Amino acid sequence: MIAGVLLLVLSGGIGTPSNSPRIHALTPPKPRIAGRLQGTDQALRFASSTLIFADWLTTVDGIRQGLTETNPILGPRPSIGRVNVMIGAGLLLNTFAVAKIKSAPLRRGVWLTVLLFEVKAVHANRKSGCAFSFSF
């Protein structure tokens, strides 16, 4: 009988007010706050957006030099206005729309894909002699 009461007291059944918080060894993880991205997501978004911006700058410089554009969406000889609109829209989509994808693996996969394509594009632009020109 005494062992049962002692076990009940130690387990928190007696002597613990009902309004006091209990700490359990197996608490579930806190849910992610809606709209907040984790560190990995923030890093991927920042890196891919930075490379899109670098591609934008080098693409504008390449067009001014008379080089042929290899992006099939822009076409071989796009105007600087078309480049500004298309790449600017892509940068906005990458920064804000991709972040709204609920599935973390899909969202991160999109950013990784953009990152890889942009590394290739910036490398090719720099290899062609394009500079990071800030005059749009």
Image (tube, rainbow, N blue to C red):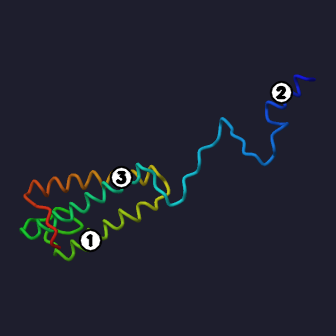
In the picture provided, is 23 more to the left or to the right than 7?
Answer: left
Estimate the x, y position of residue 67 in percent, counting from the top left. 8, 65
| Residue appearing at x 27%, y 58% in the figure | 50
In the picture provided, is 26 more to the left or to the right than 51?
Answer: right
| Residue appearing at x 27%, y 51% in the figure | 116
Query: Mark 2: few, some, or many residues within 10 Å (few <14, many ≥20)?
Result: few
Estimate the x, y position of residue 5 in percent, counting from the top left. 88, 28
Residue 7: mark: 2
Q: Is residue 39 above or below residue 80?
A: above
Q: Is residue 53 above or below residue 80?
A: above
Residue labelled with disc 1: 86
Q: What whole-number distance in Å separates the C-alpha atoms at marks 2 and 1?
A: 70 Å
Estimate the x, y position of residue 10 in percent, counting from the top left. 79, 30
The three-letter amino acid code for the residue at tag 3 is Leu
Q: What whole-number distance in Å separates the C-alpha atoms at marks 1 and 3?
A: 21 Å
Local SS, label 2: helix
Q: The C terminus lies in which quarter of the figure?
A: bottom left
Local SS, label 1: helix
Q: What whole-number distance in Å separates the C-alpha atoms at marks 3 and 2?
A: 52 Å
Q: Nearer the viewer, mark 3 or mark 2?
A: 2
The three-letter amino acid code for the residue at tag 1 is Met
